[in-house]
Image: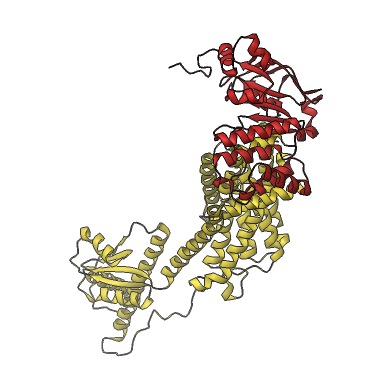
Amino acid sequence: MFKLLIALEKEFLLLVKDKVGIALLFVMPIILVITITAIQNNTFKMVNENTTRLLICNRDSGQLSSKLLHTMDSLKLFQSYFISPATSLENLNDSMKLHDAMITLLIPERFSVSLQRNIDRKVAGSLEGFGIQNQVTKSEHLERTEIKTYYHPVLQESYRISMLGTFNSLVAMTENQLMVENIYKAINGEQKTTKPVDLSERGIVVQEGVAGYTDKNSVPNATQHNVPAWTIFAMFFMVVSLGGSIVKEKLRGSFIRLKILPTSYFINILAKQLTYLFISIAMVFVIFSIGKFVFPYLDLPGLNIPSNLIGLLTLTIITGWCAVSYALCVGVFSQTQEQCSGFGAVSIVILAAVGGVFVPSFAMPASFELIMKSTPFYWSLRSFYDLFLENKGITDIGLNLIPLLLFIILFQAAAYIGLKRKNLI
Amino acid sequence: MLAIEVNNLCYTYPKQVGQPLSKINLNIEKGERFGLFGPNGAGKTTLIQLLTGVLKNKEGSIRIQNEPLNQHFKNKRSIGFVPQDFAFYDELNPIENLKFFGAWSGLNSTEIKQRTEELLNVLGLYPVKESALKTFSGGMKRRINLAIGIIHKPEILFLDEPTVGVDVQTKRAIINYLLELNRSGTTLVYTSHQLEEAEKLCTRISMINEGKIITEGLLNELLKQKNVSNLETLFLQLTGKSFKDGCLNF
């Protein structure tokens, strides 16, 4: 026990005296969590809070395009900037850069004419069924006209699809409103002053809710999703520090002393594990505290700590131990610090990507399911989400902890075999 | 009484990375100042690593103080090692290093404190006891390297080039301290390429070349026998003038 305490003291001293190492362990994950949460939160705001900059090139001289733009304006989804209708496609990119716009909407020359004809055709067709004669000439074919959208290359596909849906809805809304107005006029005559029904008035509204949540304020947000996910990432990223420490010890001269002195190297390895387990728990505490207390000052949603604190502590310890075991394994098998940091960092990014930190697990291809479940990230993230998003209890997350414990056994066993094979214990 | 007894010791590296040893036989008496010499790549380090238990022998036997090395865990405390490389944590200060390696050597808290005070004073490191070793000069690092190796008062001390890269004053201080240790009963097993220094320290020597012991005996007798005036001439006479580490002469 005395030797273990002395070894723990040595590990703590080595850590504390390495200011850059400490900064890497604590400051970098904090920056990472804040950055990712802020970006995701901003994306959410961009879609919902009228922050997307839209460039409009209206080449149509009719009134219907103005009506379309008026409807769009009323939705307050975009900050619109108008550019000259004469702007060529070649110059569009420069105009987008100039206005820092993400999307350009190009309304073609004959938009109003085509839209009016199509509406007339539909109105005439509808009225014919009621035996009402319409004065408007019905065109034989639907006129096809294209409103074009040009996106900044950085926009992701999901966002582009969402915007395309918005524009299609806008055109449909405008078209329907005009149809109703035309039918109204056809039935009531031009002289009637009564306004037709406003289609933008909606009686039935689609509301979103989150299963299991009754309190609207606690609905999951970017913070609830990102803080636990990136905290796990940071815990596993300790592989660079702990793995590096093991390799450094193997390479430095002091190792030869450790081998000949009458104390098992296993005690040194145990001390390293306990030190870094403590560090990982401290890291979680610091990051979660920042999420709860500092995020609101950064205009980010505050982190709601789950009520099940015992479950949270248990999960943190097991995830931390799993991360430490992985780092131990990488450190034992690496020959150089470059190997350790290179393989360690890349493997963590891959495991995190596969395990659902970057992309939600439900969005993964079905063929990935087995690979996904064979990463500790998946089980840890799932358990953290159970606590943070679904407020589950320790017994509910218990089943997810079993795979994590199996990973710990696997990594520890591999490290033990590695140490034995290298004649280190 | 024999401190170290080696019989028919053979060793081959798994991937042929070092000089294999063949049929080494060696007896070192308790309290002796024994020197092990040979050209680069002759097998000295391999032999010392086998004697200290860093490498495990498959053929032949090693006995330390009449006990087989592999059943010798408790006696490991009786072995001290001062490697050529600086074997300490240079981020830590002398006290922290001595505390860790003292505990690792089996000393308790009181013994560690007492020995730390003693060694820091004897080796002139007391004024810098709280400075990180990375700020030390080469000579100071050599002294702390020695202090760590002897904190547990080993009965047998292996020294691998303990004075390499230090100034005359430090070299002299280290050699004098080693002689003092020997007077108090410590067996010294010394290896170095500094043959003038070796002459002052060793009473009996062994020459190793290409994994084999080529001569062994009392230093004075060997010099007389081969009719040479110093260890360097003897060394060249026995091992030749060409490079022994696989390089071409220039």
Report how many numbered discs are placed on residues in the image: 0
Q: Residue A106 vs residue A25: left or right?
A: left
Colour that chain B carries in the picture: red
Residue ID at (77%, 43%): B107
Residue B220, compared with residue A369, is above or below; it is: above
| Image coloring type | by chain
Q: Quadrant of the C terminus of chain A?
A: top right
Q: Is residue A20 visible?
A: yes
Given residues B120 and B66, the one toward you in this image is: B120
Residue B217: x, y in percent? 69, 15
Residue A240 lies, with reference to residue A206, above or below; the image says above
- Chain the render paints yellow: A
Across and down, in percent, residue B213 comes to: 65, 14
Instruction: Give how far across and how far down residue A31 sits, in percent.
Output: 50, 61
Give the x, y percent position of residue B106.
77, 41
> In the displayed structure, does residue A424 sit left or right of residue B42?
right
